[in-house]
Image: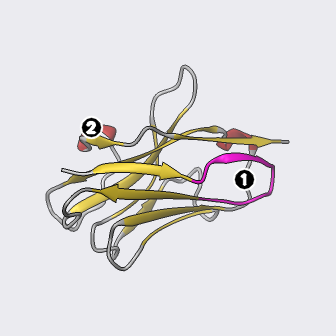
Amino acid sequence: QVQPVESGGGAVQAGDSLRLSCTLTGRTVSGYTVSWFRQGPGKEREFVAGVNWLGTKTDTAASVKGRFTVSRDSVARTVFLQMDDLKPEDSDIYYCAADRVRPGDSVRNSPSDFAYWGQGTQVTVSS
């Protein structure tokens, strides 16, 4: 069992960059795929980007492709979401989610695939 912990959110101007971090706490992080989601008031939780536990496969939502990049450190404990050219519509609470999935090397983009969630970090982009 792991607990994701997000950090790195904040308030920025349109066109700025932010890097979010998701650190998995727990005895072992082997086999846990990680994805980022975001959710605003009255909206459903939306997939942003994800990476498999090996760090060899990634997936990015069309709405952020070319601006957001997901990566994982070499020991697989921390996942980063590099967000460039931020837009006001990117303002949301960003959540990190982790779980062991089948097949083990896949990336998942549905909230229902994940049992372990962080508390979220607020990103606010002003125009």
Q: How far apart are labels 2 and 1 at the CA level?
A: 27 Å
Q: Secondary structure at mark 1?
A: loop
Closer to the camera in the image, 55 or 121? 121
Residue 126, image x, y percentages? 81, 41
| Residue 48 falls inside the magenta stretch | no
Which disc, if any, is residue 127? none
Label 1: how many Cα within 10 Å (few below 14, some 14–19, many 20+) = many
Residue designated by label 2? 112
Quarter of image, res 41: top right
Quarter of image, res 100: bottom left
Q: Amino acid at mark 1?
A: Leu
Please identify the residue farthest to the bottom as the structure is shown. Answer: 74
Q: Amino acid at mark 2?
A: Ser
Q: Secondary structure at mark 2?
A: helix
Residue designated by label 1? 86
Would you say 110 lies left or right of 36 here?
left
Q: Which residues are magenta?
A: 8-19
Would you say 104 lies left or right of 121 here?
left
Q: In which quadrant is the C terminus drawn?
A: top right
Would you say 115 lies left or right of 66 here?
left
Would you say 19 lies left or right of 110 here?
right
- The residue at 26%/37% (across/down) is 112
Label 2: how many Cα within 10 Å (few below 14, some 14–19, many 20+) = few
Q: Is residue 103 above or below residue 124?
A: below
- The residue at 46%/28% (across/down) is 44
Residue 106, image x, y percentages? 25, 63
- The residue at 33%/39% (across/down) is 111
Residue 103, image x, y percentages? 15, 62
Q: Is residue 6 above or below residue 107?
A: above
Please identify the residue farthest to the top as the structure is shown. Answer: 42
Of pointers 2 and 1, the one earlier in the residue sequence: 1
- The residue at 24%/60% (across/down) is 32
